[in-house]
Image (cartoon, rainbow, N blue to C red):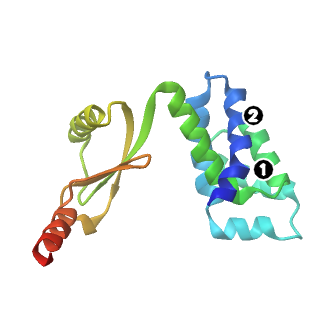
């Protein structure tokens, strides 16, 4: 959604400039957690209610974050407060995504999502990430998500690039080849 991206960009850039590179990785974790909270439909419905003050929404989100063991930096909290006051809570996941992209660009790395049909243990993941870093020619910060529909193999998404070595993809290729 281009509109959300346009709304989110100034917030993400301001937070990134405020971090000055020092706290960016810590703030990235905080922003990812806040984005996850802001994605909750019930929370957004509560926040959109005209009977609820922005301070109540902020207190609720900060309280939930604190219960989950997340202590917000005061500048991240200020950003959250500003986003809520401006009625932009729905843009928070996009803000977190753009902030993450800025942090990654500064560090020369990228986020990678490795979809696998089965759980990957830590030792195997290290080997997979090393091979993927060679393939994509950059440092990757990978996270694994289980997708049983893949049947076997992995599907890797790095930004807008996709590497699909799953059994499902190979079966689809065979299907196309046989029906052509």
Name the residue at 52% across, 31% down.
105
Q: Is residue 157 above or below residue 44?
A: above
Q: Is residue 63 visible?
A: no
* Residue 169 locus on image (x, y percent): 22, 63
Q: Which residue is mark 2?
A: 75
Q: Is residue 104 visible?
A: yes
Number of other residues with Cα within 10 Å of mark 2, as a class: few under 14, some 14 to 19, many 20 or more: few
- Left/right of residue 121 with respect to residue 96 in the rendered view: left
Name the residue at 78% across, 64% down.
47
- Of 100 and 68, the residue lying toward us: 100
Q: Which residue is mark 1?
A: 83
Q: Label 2's element? A: helix
Number of other residues with Cα within 10 Å of mark 1, as a class: few under 14, some 14 to 19, many 20 or more: many
Q: Residue furthest bottom?
A: 179
Q: Residue furthest front?
A: 180
Q: Label 1's element? A: helix
Name the residue at 54% across, 39% down.
101
């Amino acid at each position: 959604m281009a509109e959300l991206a346009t709304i989110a960009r100034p917030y993400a850039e301001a937070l990134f400039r405020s971090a000055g590179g020092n706290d960016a990785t810590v703030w990235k974790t905080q922003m990812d957690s806040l984005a996850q909270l802001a994605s909750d439909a019930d929370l957004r419905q509560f926040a959109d209610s005209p009977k609820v003050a922005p301070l109540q929404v902020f207190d609720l989100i900060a309280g939930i974050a604190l219960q989950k063991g997340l202590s917000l930096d005061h500048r991240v909290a200020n950003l959250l407060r500003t986003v809520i006051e401006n009625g932009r809570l729905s843009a928070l996941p996009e803000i977190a995504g753009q902030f993450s992209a800025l942090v990654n660009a500064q560090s020369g790395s990228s986020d990678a999502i490795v979809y696998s049909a089965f759980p990957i243990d830590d030792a195997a993941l290290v080997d997979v990430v090393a091979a993927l870093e060679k393939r994509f020619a950059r440092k990757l910060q990978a996270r694994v998500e289980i997708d049983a529909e893949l049947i076997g193999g992995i599907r890797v998404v790095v930004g807008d690039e996709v590497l699909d070595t799953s059994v499902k993809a190979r079966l689809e290729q065979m299907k196309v080849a046989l029906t052509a």
